[in-house]
């Protein structure tokens, strides 16, 4: 009966790994979410021919010696067959194509794109349902390209990763100083047995019992108008999100720092004061230095809490998945990303689970770090 | 002139009396031992001399303690200055979690001395005077936590004398040490007394008899007898003193 | 006449200047550090204050005029939204309490049994492993529980419903919500129970065994009885978490329009799912009313904490 815990954990991890591992590729991490269509043309064809097939090219790939191009059959997220570009030689003329929408812009064909349609100079058309092998044959028998349509795969989480990083970074920048100094005041400087101090502590303790969604409401009610007024943000943005997260982790930081300060032996303080130092010197030169491992735990705990946070951010930032992250606009963090792709008519389980694997990996890593820091903490005399 | 003049000192913790109308003086450049059974108030008196009792909640002091004629419990008396002139060595060495050098340099740095050369000289002199320099001169930058108990205690003494105090208070400095380390510290005290006034609290009567010039015997917050050590141990005038010394109680 | 500068006096003045600085820097630092502390302490007030301001707005004639929501019908309504301005929350509160109560009922026995298992039956070496597993469960973000709930629990509930010849909306139902919540609060209650049971003096158990009681009797009558206050704290924490859980619940509840939904296979709506789902605009009545729901949620958490704390005192009377 008590193996319930183990069973449940195994079930959950098993499920998300099962559904999600398929999509875990490097492209997922650095790719855009929204598919981009590239409409390219090639004005001139110089330097054709003479390209050698690279040794590390996948065996099932087909290579055009004339263009220095490697293509492979692949499937996209929906299971549709596509022809994927997997290699473009540095010297290939395909590196110097022009964007048909902006003829000034030079765009090189790059690996990861799916070829949709190629219209060669003699108006022969290659379509995406042509297999890679045939496409290569077409390339090898033509010397000019009028039009090339390629699509980037999308469903990448680069935007979400950057958003999450920015949110956590800014939140820590705000919450750490406020939290640490509050803790230092409460433990080292505040008068004991004082009713006012006691009330303040109680109020900080209450903060830790507040559910995430209430933090979200607060963020929406307080920080969105605030940031809108002091910047050109309109509505939810990364600053309002960071501020909301900062308030959320503040009790964690204060509590962990107070624990760390409590663990510093009083003998240090006595020795320091007996040498003629004052309270400030004692606290900052000795006590805080000794409490650093505990403060590191505080940071780790906070990051662990923030990385999975969804409800608060849905309200305080928004749910729009973005590829190009702007601080004064809304953007989805990793957890909110999962929420977004699961909402709607057809939930995208695969993508959600891939992101879930990433989040869990980070959470696991943080938990291990916390244990390591704790061990080092108790070993220090 | 006496270093300290204690006048009618009454000390209470949360209303409970720890010292009752104690009056005595501390003679300069001599070792004065405070002895008595547990709870008699000797440590409390020691802590009054550098106002470390201020740190204890609920502690209340009446009476006066004059340091060079000035009452240290006066309203605007500068307690930080007092503590640089009256140093204290505790029972537990508690080296700071820093290098040996930084430990000794801590006090001077807090007083604003930051010149590298000056600090080096101060640290070296303090370690030499504390009979520790030879043992650590190769590893000044290493952590102080790696030293043995006896070495750590001598480090505490070095830390204190780096401040160039006049008085060194010692609260049971050898209770936590083995006999060899204890012996080294006692030897050190003999040397130190040439330059510093020393007040030592000890529950070890033999130690008091060995190293002190003057002894004060306390019982339940009262100063029972204060005299030269020779007098106290050979011909105590109070019956209680004799009982304590001969081991009949405490 | 040459005025001699007395170096000793100079040093004395320098020293006393320094010592005055030391005293004042302490006072300054104390004052300086009070600022972030006051900030931290005041956030609670901010939260309640600003949410109240937005949450009361829908009911105020000054804000919404004739379109305002009637507070009484809001608090007693059994349909969430009847255009243009009728909102009802009573059924949602009932749903929420119903779901949380059932989740707690499922989770507590499992948690306590697990805690007993980990602390009393498991060999020391494995105890650390189990504790880590439970800590990991506690660290899983809600959204992932939501995905899991939709993926596995919902599907299982569909199959279960077929057994009973009942209809479900793809597994999105009250039962799914209850199960997901029970799983989510299980680690919280277990961890607190482990701490509480570990704190029980083993001497008590030895006495009990020495008096002839069996291991089971000892565990139930003595160990658990002593650990009751701690276990109860765990329950209070668990209930608090369940009441406030938004993301996972929103993914598996379904957000039924009216209710209350007491049938296990029907969709349901909780206070948190109301707040999180159907967000279309970020201003206006529909948006502001969610703050009102938030206020009700805060109220429910507050009251339940209060009641449970009261119970805890009664339960811990003999500890």
Image (spheres, rainbow, N blue to C red):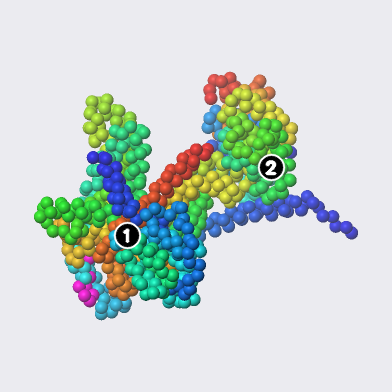
Measured from the top left, where is residue A27 in percent x and y?
40, 58
Residue at the (42%, 62%) spot, across then down = A64
| Residue pictured at 27% horizontal, 25% vertical | C210
Gap between marks 2 and 1 measured at Cα: 77 Å
Q: Position of residue A205 (x, y in %)?
A: 40, 53
The residue to which callout 2 is attached is B163
Relative to A190, residue A114 above or below: below
What is the secondary structure assignment of the residue under circle 1? strand
Q: Which residue appears farthest toward the left when viewing the image?
A: C165
Say left or right for A294 vs A151. Answer: right
Do we see residue C228 in this rendering? no
Quarter of the image that includes the C terminus of chain C = top left
Q: Secondary structure at mark 2?
A: loop
**How many neighbours does mark 2 have within 10 angstroms: few (below 14), some (14-19), or many (20 or more)?**
many
Q: Nearer the viewer, residue B31 or C145?
A: C145
Q: Residue at x 29, y 60 (%)?
A: A79
The boundaries of the magenta stretch are C82-90
Mark on residue A75? Answer: 1
Q: Is residue B66 left or right of residue C74?
A: right
């Amino acid at each position: 009966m008590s193996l319930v815990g183990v069973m449940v954990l195994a079930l959950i991890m098993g499920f998300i790994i099962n559904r999600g591992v398929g999509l875990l590729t490097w492209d997922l991490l650095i790719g855009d979410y929204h598919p981009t269509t590239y409409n390219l043309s090639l004005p001139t064809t110089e330097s054709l021919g003479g390209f050698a097939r690279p040794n590390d090219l996948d065996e099932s790939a087909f290579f055009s010696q004339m263009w220095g191009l490697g293509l492979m059959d692949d499937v996209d997220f929906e299971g549709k067959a596509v022809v994927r570009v997997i290699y473009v030689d540095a010297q290939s003329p395909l590196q110097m194509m022009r964007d048909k929408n902006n003829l000034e812009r030079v765009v090189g064909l790059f690996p990861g794109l799916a070829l949709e349609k190629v219209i060669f100079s003699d108006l022969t058309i290659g379509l995406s349902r042509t297999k890679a092998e045939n496409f290569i044959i077409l390339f090898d028998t033509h010397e000019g390209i009028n039009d090339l349509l390629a699509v980037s795969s999308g469903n990448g989480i680069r935007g979400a990763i950057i958003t999450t990083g920015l949110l956590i970074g800014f939140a820590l920048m705000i919450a750490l100083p406020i939290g640490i100094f509050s803790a230092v005041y409460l433990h080292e400087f505040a008068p004991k047995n004082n009713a006012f101090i006691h009330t303040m502590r109680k109020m900080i303790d209450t903060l830790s019992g507040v559910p995430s969604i209430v933090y979200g409401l607060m963020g929406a009610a307080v920080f969105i108008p605030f940031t809108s007024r002091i910047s050109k943000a309109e509505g939810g943005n990364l600053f309002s999100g960071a501020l909301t997260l900062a308030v959320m982790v503040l009790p964690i930081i204060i509590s962990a720092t107070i624990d760390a300060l409590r663990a510093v032996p009083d003998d240090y303080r006595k020795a320091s004061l007996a040498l003629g130092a004052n309270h400030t010197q004692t606290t900052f030169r000795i006590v805080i230095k000794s409490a650093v491992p505990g403060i590191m735990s505080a940071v780790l705990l906070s990051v662990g809490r923030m990385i999975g946070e969804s409800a608060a951010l849905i309200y305080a930032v928004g749910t729009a998945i973005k590829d190009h992250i702007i601080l004064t606009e809304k953007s989805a963090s990793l957890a909110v990303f999962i929420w977004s792709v699961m909402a709607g008519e057809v939930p995208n389980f695969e993508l959600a689970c891939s992101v879930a694997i990433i989040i869990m990996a980070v959470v696991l890593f943080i938990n291990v770090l916390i244990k390591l820091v704790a061990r080092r903490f108790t070993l220090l005399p | 002139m006496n270093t300290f003049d204690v006048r009618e000192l009454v000390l209470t913790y949360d209303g409970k009396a720890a010292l009752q109308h104690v009056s005595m003086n501390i003679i300069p450049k001599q070792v004065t031992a405070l002895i008595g059974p547990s709870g008699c108030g000797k440590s409390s008196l020691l802590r009054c001399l550098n106002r470390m009792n201020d740190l204890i909640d609920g502690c209340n002091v009446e009476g006066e303690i004059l340091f060079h004629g000035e009452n240290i419990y006066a309203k605007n008396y500068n307690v930080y200055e007092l503590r640089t002139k009256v140093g204290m060595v505790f029972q537990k060495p508690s080296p700071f979690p820093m290098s040996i050098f930084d430990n000794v340099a801590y006090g001077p740095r807090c007083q604003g001395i930051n010149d590298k050369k000056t600090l080096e000289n101060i640290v070296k002199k303090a370690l030499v005077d504390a009979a520790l320099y030879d043992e650590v001169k190769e590893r000044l930058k290493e952590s102080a936590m790696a030293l043995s108990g006896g070495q750590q205690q001598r480090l505490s003494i070095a830390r204190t004398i780096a401040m160039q105090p006049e008085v060194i208070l010692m609260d049971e400095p050898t209770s936590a040490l083995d006999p060899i380390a204890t012996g080294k510290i006692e030897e050190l005290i003999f040397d130190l007394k040439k330059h510093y006034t020393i007040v030592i609290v000890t529950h070890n009567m033999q130690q008091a008899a060995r190293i002190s010039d003057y002894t004060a015997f306390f019982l339940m917050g009262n100063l029972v007898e204060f005299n030269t050590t020779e007098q106290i141990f050979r011909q105590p005038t109070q019956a209680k003193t004799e009982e304590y010394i001969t081991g009949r109680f405490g | 006449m040459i005025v001699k500068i007395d170096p000793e006096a100079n040093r004395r003045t320098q020293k006393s200047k320094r010592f005055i600085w030391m005293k004042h820097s302490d006072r300054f630092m104390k004052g300086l550090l009070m600022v972030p502390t006051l900030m931290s302490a005041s956030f609670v007030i901010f939260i309640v204050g600003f949410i109240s301001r937005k949450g009361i707005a829908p009911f105020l004639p000054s804000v919404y005029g004739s379109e305002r929501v009637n507070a009484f019908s809001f608090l007693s309504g059994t349909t969430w939204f009847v255009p243009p301005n009728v909102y009802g929350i009573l059924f949602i509160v009932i749903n929420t309490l119903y779901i949380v109560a059932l989740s707690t009922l499922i989770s507590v026995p499992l948690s306590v049994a697990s805690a007993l298992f980990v602390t009393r039956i498991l060999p020391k070496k494995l105890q650390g492993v189990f504790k880590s597993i439970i800590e990991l469960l506690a660290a899983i973000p809600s959204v992932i529980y939501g995905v899991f709930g939709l993926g596995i629990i919902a599907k299982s509930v569909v199959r279960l419903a077929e057994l009973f010849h009942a209809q479900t909306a793809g597994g999105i139902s009250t039962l799914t919500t209850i199960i997901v919540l029970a799983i989510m609060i299980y680690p919280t209650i277990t961890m607190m129970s482990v701490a509480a049971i570990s704190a029980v003096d083993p001497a008590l158990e030895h006495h009990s065994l020495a008096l002839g009681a069996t291991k089971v009797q000892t565990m139930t009558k003595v160990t658990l009885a002593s650990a009751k206050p701690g276990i109860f704290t765990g329950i209070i924490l668990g209930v608090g978490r369940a009441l406030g859980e938004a993301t996972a619940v929103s993914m598996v509840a379904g957000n039924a329009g009216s209710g209350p939904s007491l049938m296990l296979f029907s969709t349901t709506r909780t206070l948190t799912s109301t707040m999180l789902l159907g967000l279309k605009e970020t201003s206006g009545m529909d948006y502001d009313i969610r703050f009102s729901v938030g206020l009700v949620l805060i109220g429910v958490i507050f009251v339940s904490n209060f009641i449970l704390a009261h119970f805890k005192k009664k339960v811990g009377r003999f500890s």
